[in-house]
Amino acid sequence: DGEPSDGDVRAALQPFKHLPATIVVRLCTDEDKIVDFWSDVDADLEFPLDVLDDVVSEATEVHTHNPWLTYGLPLHRLREFGCASAVVDLLDEAPLAPNQLLQVIALVYGIPPSELPHPDLDWGAFVKALDAIQKKDRGATVWDPLRNRNVLWFDKHRLARAHGKGCAIM
């Protein structure tokens, strides 16, 4: 039924606290009671635990905090497999800071974050670099489960609005 009936799950997970691992709980239900239970467990524990719902529900959560990111199936699978990058766990929890934004772009495109200008230092150069990466990799669009179509991973206009940078006209 999705909830433990033979003990305290928080206590059962404590031995994993000091291990260099991320525990992934992949829910196979959208029942609010179960989702809320596991979300509370995640909030209570002080180690890497990622509670995942289906891709559409996760995309909706990510969009709430980071609407500039297309949360596609490849990112969802990465999380399901227990990606060690802490920034991946934050996607659906809070708006990402500029340095975290760089980490996500680097992860998606397989480049070092240092290859991108820092958005706080030179927003224009950052947008231009992101645009160049996405144009270079034009064939690498991703299915957006919220819009039901292929789109680029990063929407520079939404990114500009989210980070208070006005418009990003290229």
Image (tube, rainbow, N blue to C red):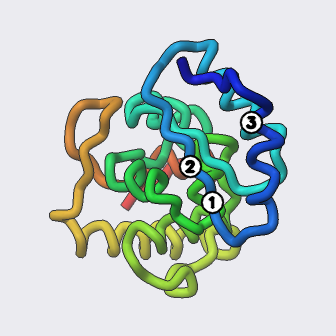
List the residue tagged with mark 2: 24
Could you tell me if residue 68 is visible in this image?
yes
Specify which label sits upstream in the sequence, 3 or 2.
Answer: 3
For residue 22, which numbered disc appears in the image? 1
Amino acid carrying mark 3 in the image? Val
- Quarter that holds the C terminus: bottom left
On screen, residue 28 versus residue 24, left or right, reads: left
Q: CA distance from mark 3 to mark 1?
A: 16 Å
> Vertically, is 34 above or below 144?
above
Label 1, secondary structure: give it: loop
For residue 86, which numbered disc appears in the image? none
Circles 1 and 2, Cβ within 8 Å, touching? The answer is: yes
Between residue 108 and residue 31, name the one nearer to us: 31
For residue 9, which numbered disc appears in the image? 3
Label 2, secondary structure: give it: strand
Residue 82: image location, x then y, percent: 52, 59
Amino acid carrying mark 1 in the image? Thr
Amino acid carrying mark 2 in the image? Val
Label 2 Cα crowd, 10 Å radius (few <14 / some 14-19 / many 20+) = some
> Vertically, is 49 above or below 34?
below
